[in-house]
């Protein structure tokens, strides 16, 4: 089975072109292929499949085999894949996900190669029951949770998948994300678990974030988490509704919550790493 390894801000996945290949047991394959010692090694598996509702469909599986609704870094890579390999060669691409159809603008260089991609991530969801999170009011901006003797205040947002964002004074570069993220991910307030973002405010238009992703652990970047982080910053009056830079372990994304249409737009890179064959059977 042919595959392609790609990354967006260090968020690396194995991509399979299901226009040509067939994957019968994606959850099992994701567990095997994601293993960084006995498999290819990745943050998960992404299937690029035909769609009756959009230009193509993206299905994403975590290393534990669970299927996620959406991944902002992965969808940029899918758009680059289908554009650069002439499967869908147009500057506006519609990709179906479990979180709905997302629209991507391809930004090319002088050689007509996709360099950065802007994703219309849609409107952030702030209603507690739709995120979902167990809370008394919406939007959820003051969810108090504790772990290892420390108290944190979370703002909860869904970008098609649940996120809980906390702004901390500790230097996030040194913060023990695994110790706290692994606890909060499975907190009873989150019926479907949650992705956990720990954030430093460098300025109103410049944030620094690390993320603990449900079903995966800490990753170098999370596109939906970056969008949720900026949404949380806007909801709390920290950031304006304009372009905000977010520094991640794997690079930088530019996020804007546009108040004209209420949508969040994410711009960032996507890169090919290598192609290969996996003996799948």
Image: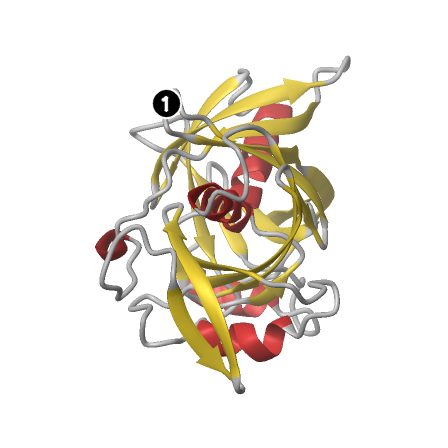
Q: Which residue is found at the position 70% from the left and 73% from the top?
A: 37
Task: Name the residue furthest front.
Answer: 237
Is residue 179 toward the left or the right of residue 232 in the image?
right
Q: Is residue 113 above or below residue 99?
A: above
Q: Pick whichever, 199 or 251, lies toward us.
A: 199
Is residue 225 toward the left or the right of residue 273 in the image?
left
Report whether residue 93 is seen: yes
Position in image of residue 232 (x %, y %): 46, 48
Task: Name the residue furthest top.
Answer: 110
Q: Pick whichever, 19 or 89, lies toward us.
A: 89
Q: Pick whichever, 118 or 252, lies toward us.
A: 252
Q: Is residue 86 above or below residue 24?
A: above
Q: Is residue 164 above or below residue 48?
A: below
The image quadrant that residue 133 belongs to is bottom left
Position in image of residue 240 (x %, y %): 53, 33
Q: Residues within 10 Å of mark 1 (few under 14, many from 20)?
A: few
The image quadrant that residue 255 belongs to is top right
Report whether residue 161 is seen: no
Q: Which residue is mark 1?
A: 261
Position in image of residue 185 (x %, y %): 45, 71
SS of the residue under disc 1 = loop
Q: Which residue is found at the position 60% from the left and 28% from the top?
A: 117
Position in image of residue 24 (x %, y %): 39, 57
């Amino acid at each position: 089975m042919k595959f392609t390894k790609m990354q967006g801000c260090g968020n690396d996945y194995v991509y399979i072109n299901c226009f040509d290949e067939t994957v019968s047991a994606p959850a099992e394959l994701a567990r095997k292929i994601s293993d960084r010692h006995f498999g290819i090694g990745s943050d998960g598996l992404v299937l690029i499949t035909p769609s009756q509702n959009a230009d193509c469909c993206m299905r994403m599986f975590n290393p534990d085999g669970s299927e996620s609704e959406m991944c902002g870094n992965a969808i940029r890579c899918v758009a680059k894949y289908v554009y650069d390999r002439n499967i869908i060669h147009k500057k506006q691409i519609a990709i179906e996900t479990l979180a709905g159809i997302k629209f991507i603008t391809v930004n090319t260089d002088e050689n007509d190669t996709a360099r950065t991609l802007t994703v219309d991530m849609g409107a952030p969801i702030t209603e507690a029951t739709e995120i979902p999170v167990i809370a008394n009011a919406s939007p959820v901006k003051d969810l108090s949770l504790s772990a290892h003797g420390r108290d944190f205040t979370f703002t909860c947002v869904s970008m098609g998948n649940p996120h809980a964002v906390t702004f901390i004074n500790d230097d996030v570069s040194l913060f023990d994300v695994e110790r706290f993220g692994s606890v909060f991910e499975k907190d009873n307030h989150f019926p479907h678990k949650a992705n956990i973002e720990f954030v430093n405010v460098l300025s109103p238009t410049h944030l620094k974030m690390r993320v603990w992703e449900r079903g995966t652990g800490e990753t170098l970047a999370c596109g939906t988490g970056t969008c949720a982080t900026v949404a949380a910053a806007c909801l709390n009056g920290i950031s304006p509704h304009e372009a905000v830079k977010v520094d991640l372990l794997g690079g930088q994304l530019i996020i804007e919550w546009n108040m004209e249409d209420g949508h969040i737009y994410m711009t960032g890179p996507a890169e090919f790493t290598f192609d290969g064959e996996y003996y799948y059977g």
